[in-house]
Amino acid sequence: MNRARVARHAGQGALLVALFVFLFPIAWLFSTAYKRAADIFAIPPVLTFTPTLRNFETLFEFFNVPQLTLNTIIISFGTAIVALTLGTPAAYALARLDRWWAHGIAYFFLAIRMIPPVAILIPFYLMMRDVGLLGTYWALIILDAMQSTSFVVWMMFGYFRGVPKEIEEAAVVDGCTQWGAFIRIVLPTVVPGLIASALFCILFAWNNFIFPSFLTNSQTRPLSVALVSAYGSNEINWGTMGALAHFSVLPIVALALLLNRYFVQGLTRGVH
Amino acid sequence: MIGLPALLYMVLVALWPLGQGLYYSFTDYTLTRPGRVNWVGWENYTDMFADPSARRAILNTFVFTFAAVGLQLAVGLGLALLLWRESRFNRIALALMLIPVTVTPLAVGLMFRAMLEPDFGILGYWARVLGLSPTRGFLADENLALATLILIDVWEWTPLMALILLAGLKSLPTDILEAAEVDGASRFQRFWRIIVPMLLPAIFLALVMRSMDAFKIYDSVFVTTGGGPNDATNVLMYHAAKIGLEFFQIGAASAVSTFMLICVGLLAASFVLMIRAAESRLGAR
């Protein structure tokens, strides 16, 4: 008996060490926001510091934070809306088609996600330049939503196949139209899948860097692109970076923690 | 019918640009020198294989992918085993452990660059003073920069690996595990003879996902080393984006990205074959 208890405590101890390794850098990142330059550039580096809000003043002085945040929200929510609107019906149709090629098409959507982004980005960049959309939200949303739609189709395909056909057929017999049965009977049963899908669409678009760094301009750029310039010089230093991280990193981490159940579901179900 | 818009969207925004890229890769298309676009055959590809910088990128990308994903598998499997038992402590530990997965990858790169900075960084300073790192720091050293990037990737994505393996562990039939315990199989035997073979499909799945992602590493390279020092951390995705969208040599960059596409396809195909083999072996039992 005692050996089992010792083993369990050793396991918990090991997990606590792992948690420290995974969480310390993040805590450090946020703590830099409250450090004076003197504490940031102390030799040797120190963990203690006199709290200050000076870095947030610098941040708002050099960066249009409300605009950056708004851009990020427009891009990530826009992506989620487009991807869910297009992807959900497609996933439903594929799940209900009893043909061998329906599975093939589902795998086609999965394969889209494996394409190296740069293979599409370069020609897409030229396309957007030719049609004059380069630098607009649309250029980025169209490309982000392409990736997210393929993800949503694959993920929702799995959820819809878990819904028994009989309950829709019963609804149709009771006088519902096919479309009505989909909206009123099937969709409500896959709400967890829809939440998980939306969360991932937002997460991908929010954290993406390579697409916005080439497709947006100084007016439409999101937080992730601004983060690069919040580092380096004497005045704009790690403190500014830590302060900006409160806007770029904290919201998405908080959202994923808040929706942890759906986040875990998406990571374990949506991927296969 | 209602699936058509999504399918059309994929064709227009994924396949069409992909096809264009394939075509560009056989031309001398550059934005800096306007004029006719000429068909040059395989020239961009032969140039790529002759270019030391591109060759280094190919090598680095494969080293990075296999080393990072291999380490993630080893550490992730350990964590998954620790988290296996159902308890409140483990549930909370898992939720907290997944935080690195959600942090913006670019911010992760910046964060580690600051922490590893050899003069003021909380890790870099002590590593330098204790003689563990070269004076210019890990990221500025030709021999250590790629290894450092690999460890950053391990920090960021191991929790995801652990989660997928944990889901695999939880779906194992408990009767077989209990029977083995009753029959007196040791912990070691149970792990290697029963758990690992039954977990193989989950392991391969996690490997496919992670290696596809690791193969297209970009953000942390861009923000920590910029491919340097001396191409020591140049990777394919970074190389293609740089020559394509900074130097605007569209043809040459398209050859690199097409090459990446072929590698990813071969990688995925070999994993699928391994999954099939693992599953049929399991089914045969």
Image (cartoon, coloured by chain):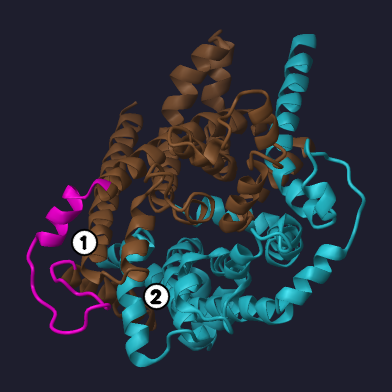
User: Residue at 81% of width from left, 54% of height from top?
Assistant: A37
**Dot 1 crowding, Cα within 10 Å, few <14, some 14–19, many 20+:** many
Q: Give me the disc on residue B255.
A: 1
Residue that mark 2 sits on: A93
Element under disc 2? helix
User: Residue at 49% of width from left, 76% of height from top?
Assistant: A83
Image colour for chain A is: cyan
Q: Position of residue B44 (x, y in %)?
A: 15, 61
Parent chain of label 2: A
User: Residue at 34% of width from left, 36% of height from top?
Assistant: B279
For residue A219, above or below residue B173: below
Query: Which region of the structure is painted magenta?
Result: B25-52
Q: Answer whether residue A106 is visible to the viewer in this image.
A: no
- Is B175 magenta? The answer is no
Element under disc 1? helix
Chain depicted in brown: B
Nearer to us of marks 1 and 2 is 1
- Please state if B129 lies on the left or on the right of A56 as rendered: left
